[in-house]
Amino acid sequence: MIEPEAKAQARILIVDDEPFNIEILTEHLENSGYLVEPAYDGQEAWDILQDERNRFDAILLDRMMPRMNGMELLAKIKQLDRFKTLPVILQTAMGSPDAVREGLQAGAYYYLTKPFERETLLAIVAAAVRDRLAQLELLKQLEQQRDTLTMLRYGEFQFRTLAEAKRLTALLSSVCPQPEKVAMGLSELLINAVEHGNLGITYKEKTKLVQDNAWEGELNQRLSLPQYASRRASVMLTRDNSEIRFVVADQGDGFDWKPFMEFSPDRAFDPHGRGISMARMLSFDAIEYQGNGNTVVATIKLG
């Protein structure tokens, strides 16, 4: 859930060659508290992004445009390190699985098919901004932890809440050669261990909770229930000369992890569900689930 003051500071770049579309999108987003910057084709958007004084929390990108289309702009955005974690929401009239898959593979992990309802637009934008703000908070914590744990070879920790999971993410990512990249994926694995593992929140339940802005409230309620109060998740770190390994385990019933290793176009329009596939593609060299899915091993190769 995005707090009102946080959302009011979120800045969205809208890229669309249709002035009417920009007008409608701007109205919806500004009425919901976002700051909006328009660009009327990919080249204009790229010129805006080249100015390092411009900071955005998400890009709402049309696919079919003159001069530079959405896919061409997306490729240029994802080539630069400072934009790698910037959420891109690809909007298009093309709703085929292949078109969605192409966008996902290019780095657009959020998707809108025209025409879309106002509520769908706001739910996807809110999810993208929430993920962006969480990533920026992790980066801030990483700066505080940097260089403090580079000699750590082994560590095992238990955690119960999302706040504890986030603190451990910042702590353990600082051991890695590219902590910012690792933090994004490790955070997802630790949060999954709490919400889906120990607290038993299903994918369908989370979808509705996020849409209703009730996700954090449900987490806090379940943490207070007797059947969940004693459950702990754990993360173990080991490091040798060839690799860094994280083993994350929870005390839940497990889940069918196989569909989530790849980001399916069928889930492209949901406000969550990208974490495992993004962790596998962007943060780790390998991810392996064990047993019934309540233990996951994530590996980073060294050298």
Image: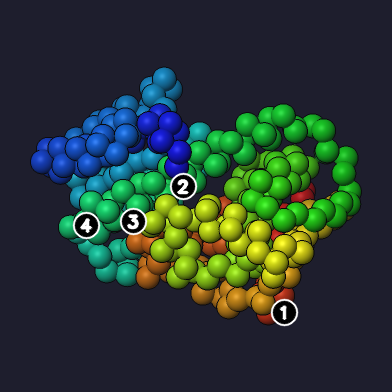
Q: What residue is rendered at 31% in x and 30% in y?
A: 35
Q: Position of residue 115 (x, y in %)?
A: 17, 57
User: Upstream in the sequence, badge 3 or badge 2?
Assistant: 2
Q: Are marks 3 and 1 in contact (CB under 8 Å)?
A: no
Looking at the picture, does residue 130 appear above or below residue 46? below
Label 3 sits on a secondary structure element that is strand
Rounded to the nearest whole Å, what is the CA distance between mark 1 and mark 2? 32 Å
Image position of 176 (left or right of 53): right
User: Upstream in the sequence, badge 4 or badge 2?
Assistant: 2
Specify the amino acid type for callout 4.
Phe
Disc on res. 1: 2
Rounded to the nearest whole Å, what is the CA distance between mark 4 and mark 1? 40 Å
Specify the amino acid type for callout 2.
Met
Q: What residue is rendered at 75% in x and 33% in y?
A: 145
Q: Residues within 10 Å of mark 1 (few under 14, many from 20)?
A: few
Rounded to the nearest whole Å, what is the CA distance between mark 4 and mark 2? 21 Å
Image position of 57 (left or right of 244): left
Specify the amino acid type for callout 1.
Gly
Do we see residue 81 in this rendering?
A: no
User: Upstream in the sequence, badge 4 or badge 1?
Assistant: 4
Q: Residues within 10 Å of mark 4 (few under 14, many from 20)?
A: few
Tell me the quarter of the picture where residue 235 sits.
bottom right
Residue at numbered disc 4: 116
Front: mark 4 or 2: 2
Residue at numbered disc 3: 111
Label 2 sits on a secondary structure element that is loop
Do we see residue 112 in this rendering?
A: yes
Residue at numbered disc 1: 291
Q: Are marks 1 and 2 in contact (CB under 8 Å)?
A: no
Q: Position of residue 137 (x, y in %)?
A: 58, 36
User: Upstream in the sequence, badge 3 or badge 1?
Assistant: 3
